[in-house]
Image (cartoon, rainbow, N blue to C red):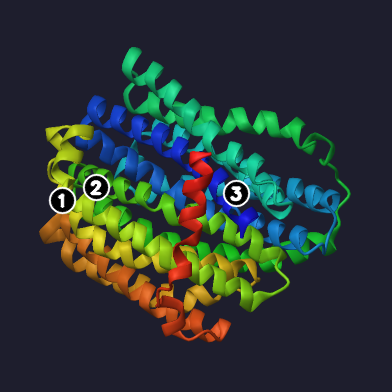
């Protein structure tokens, strides 16, 4: 547990930096551009961010699994990754262009569409690289891949949006800068430059994609539950309502960094664990802790929501308060899924999440279509909360069945649950 806590602490520092840089960037574009232009940005970025789920083909997860289990060597995996990356880059850009250009109101501006597409190859490359670091349990390198780009995006956004007043174009250019910088470093740091070859090992590629596609499809359905409201708002409402929603939901995304902090370590450790049930019991302990922490944080956020929204984004986003408050109950419940899903994914069972997420997604779409025309952003928030709650309750039942651990055992607090917090506090003091 000690080494586990060290990894949690390490990723925790990375997450704090990501939240700080990301939140500052979000504040800058909110105050500089206003709700309507923020809505255009949200609509432009929803397809690239969504398609990263299927476009990455689950390569990071399958890389972590095969490398962690020692099924393939690092060199075999690197060569396969470079070949898969070239294909997925072309595929991702092509599909995203069609979706943005012809299925989004914000896709009418070709220049903005092109700018929104440019980060895709570099983001994919970094995603694939991170799977190698997770498979080798090199959490420190994994952290840097995540927080350094957010810092660079903040610097470039400040220069292009605040100083040069490039508006939406400036922010989209900044989004390319961070991934591009890390990609250039990783090309040599991780010796990927030597992995590019025309000699194909179809056995490795086939096995990585056969497992990876399952991860990718599962992740696509999960992310659709998070993004479908923006897609439907873009088509059924106005850019203003989309902008209001995007800022309300952005606060919950930062709140989710707490369970995601645990999930990254859980996935990496689960992939190399020899005692599956014993590890799942540790995951259940982390679930109970994270649920408590998220619950308390959400209560504080609910009580201070108006102050926080206005302080960060300005009076123009006052309607985002209702969005945030409506989303919080669902966010708390979905913490269950966020933490324990990575355990099953690390065990090579990503398909279990589909049993919970597919019904939840269908309900989310139906409710959004009903609620958005009349209630706009707040209607989308209500649909998401109901969907998140259903997904969480279904998934814990399926997780219990897969791990053969009773639900009561999973959710019952014990005095020993709080030892990790005590240990982290002691480490921080020392």
Label 3 crowd bin: few (<14), some (14–19), many (20+), radius 10 Å = some
Q: Is residue 283 left or right of residue 330?
A: right
Residue at mark 2: 248
Distance (Cα) linking label 3 and label 2 = 32 Å
Q: Is residue 99 left or right of residue 176?
A: left
**Secondary structure state at the residue bearing disc 1:** helix
Q: Is residue 265 left or right of residue 284?
A: right
Vertical relation: 388 (above or below) 48: below
Image coordinates of residue 239 in percent, x first then y, are 22, 43
Residue at mark 1: 303
Vertical relation: 15 (above or below) 25: below
Label located before the other in sequence (2 or 1) = 2
Residue at mark 3: 6
Residue 185 sits in which quadrant? top right
- Residue visible at 28% across and 65% down? 330
- Residue visible at 64% across and 50% down? 88
């Amino acid at each position: 547990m000690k080494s586990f806590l060290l990894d949690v602490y390490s990723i925790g520092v990375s997450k704090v930096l990501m939240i700080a840089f990301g939140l500052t960037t979000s504040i800058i574009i909110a105050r500089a551009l206003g709700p309507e232009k923020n809505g255009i940005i949200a609509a432009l970025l929803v397809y690239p961010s969504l398609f990263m789920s299927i476009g990455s083909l689950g390569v990071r997860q399958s890389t972590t699994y095969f490398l962690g289990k020692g099924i393939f060597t690092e060199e075999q995996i690197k060569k396969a990754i470079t070949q898969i990356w070239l294909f997925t880059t072309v595929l991702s850009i092509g599909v995203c262009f069609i979706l943005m250009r012809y299925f989004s109101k914000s896709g009418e501006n070709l220049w903005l569409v092109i700018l929104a597409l440019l980060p895709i190859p570099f983001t994919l490359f970094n995603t694939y690289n991170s799977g190698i670091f997770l498979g080798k349990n090199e959490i420190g390198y994994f952290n840097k891949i995540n927080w350094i780009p957010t810092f660079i995006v903040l610097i470039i956004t400040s220069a292009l949006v605040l100083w040069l007043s490039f508006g939406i174009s400036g922010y989209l250019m900044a989004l390319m800068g961070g991934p591009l910088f890390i990609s250039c470093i990783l090309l040599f740091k991780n010796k990927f430059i030597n992995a590019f070859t025309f000699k194909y090992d179809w056995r490795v590629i086939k096995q990585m994609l056969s497992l990876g596609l399952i991860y990718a499809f599962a992740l696509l359905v999960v992310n659709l539950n998070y993004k479908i409201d923006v897609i439907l708002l873009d088509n059924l409402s106005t850019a203003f309502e989309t902008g209001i929603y995007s800022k309300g939901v952005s606060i919950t995304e930062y709140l989710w960094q707490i369970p995601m902090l645990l999930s990254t370590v859980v996935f990496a450790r689960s992939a190399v664990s020899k005692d599956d049930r014993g590890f799942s019991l540790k995951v259940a302990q982390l679930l109970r802790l994270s649920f408590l922490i998220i619950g308390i944080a959400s209560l504080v956020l609910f009580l201070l929501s108006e102050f926080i929204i206005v302080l960060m984004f300005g009076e123009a986003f006052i309607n985002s308060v209702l969005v945030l408050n409506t989303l919080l109950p669902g966010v708390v419940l979905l913490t269950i899924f966020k933490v324990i899903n990575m355990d099953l994914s690390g065990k090579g069972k990503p398909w279990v999440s589909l049993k919970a997420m597919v019904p939840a997604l269908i309900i989310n779409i139906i409710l959004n279509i009903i609620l958005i025309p009349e209630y706009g952003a707040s209607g989308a928030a209500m649909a998401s909360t109901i969907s998140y709650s259903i997904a969480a309750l279904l998934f814990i039942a399926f997780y219990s069945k897969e791990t053969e651990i009773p639900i009561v055992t999973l959710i019952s607090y014990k005095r020993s649950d709080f030892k990790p917090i005590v240990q982290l506090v002691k480490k921080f003091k020392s």
